[in-house]
Amino acid sequence: MKTVNFTEMKSGTKDEYLLLDKYEQEYINGTADRILNFIKGLTATLEGYKVSRLEHSLQTATRAYKDKADEEMVVAALLHDIGDELAPLNHSEYAAAVLKPYVSKKTHWIIEKHGEFQMYYYAHHLGKNKNQRDKYKDHEYYNDAVNFCEKWDQASFDPNYKSMTLEDFSPMVKRIFSRKPYSLL
């Protein structure tokens, strides 16, 4: 593989940056495969849950799919917790950042905020504000986020639920991540 000669970015030439851009585009084209490989590895879980993170993700996406959510939202449901591994304190924002170039403003917002919306189900047990989501009450996507959490996310910890497989979702992930990024439209 050809490499650049510079050791400081400010010294790079146009030809070197064109080369790097070519490599970057090839790398970007592999994003869906890297995401699928990553999510395949989510077979462990935090202590105490009855299902793995992978199974939780599959259940959430399966519920969205069965509810006839659009493909973008099904993929977002599958990936909504991918931040748990590397960003447990802001996993929602992490997942939303991964999805942002490829999904609508609405889908991005729902995924970005779902962690706060999920607090509705447990925060009061920990002496925290279960109504954290109320600060978004007037937001245009508030009810969509409530529904995401109520119908799909919070209900997806059932070891007896029959989920679709990651292979079932793979073509959807590949289609979403092969879209032209929204920022370029």
Image (tube, helix red, strand yellow):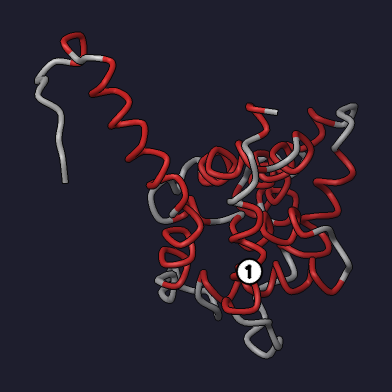
Residue 85 position within the rendered picture, expressed as x and y whole percent measured from the top left: 40, 56
Give the vertical position of 45 relative to 19 (above or below): below
The residue depicted at 55 percent of the width and 46 percent of the height is 95
Tell me: 137 left or right of 62.
right
Mark 1 lies on a secondary structure that is helix
The residue nearer to you, when weighing 100 against 134, is: 100
Residue 104 position within the rendered picture, expressed as x and y whole percent measured from the top left: 75, 38
The quarter holding residue 56 reads bottom right
Task: Pick out the residue farthest to the front.
Answer: 15
Task: Pick out the residue farthest to the top.
Answer: 10
In the rendered image, which residue does mark 1 sit on?
171
The residue depicted at 77 percent of the width and 37 percent of the height is 133
Give the vertical position of 162 relative to 103 (above or below): below
The residue nearer to you, when weighing 183 against 23, is: 23
Q: Quadrant of the C terminus?
A: top right
Going by the numbered disc 1, the residue's amino acid type is: Pro
Give the vertical position of 183 relative to 55 (above or below): above
The residue depicted at 51 percent of the width and 42 percent of the height is 94
Tell me: 23 left or right of 65.
left
Residue 101 position within the rendered picture, expressed as x and y whole percent measured from the top left: 60, 36
Residue 70 position within the rendered picture, expressed as x and y whole percent measured from the top left: 83, 58
- Neighbour tally class for label 1: few under 14, some 14-19, many 20 plus, Cα within 10 Å: few
The residue nearer to you, when weighing 172 against 126, is: 172
Tell me: 44 left or right of 92.
left
The residue depicted at 86 percent of the width and 46 percent of the height is 144
Q: How many discs appear?
A: 1
The quarter holding residue 130 reads top right
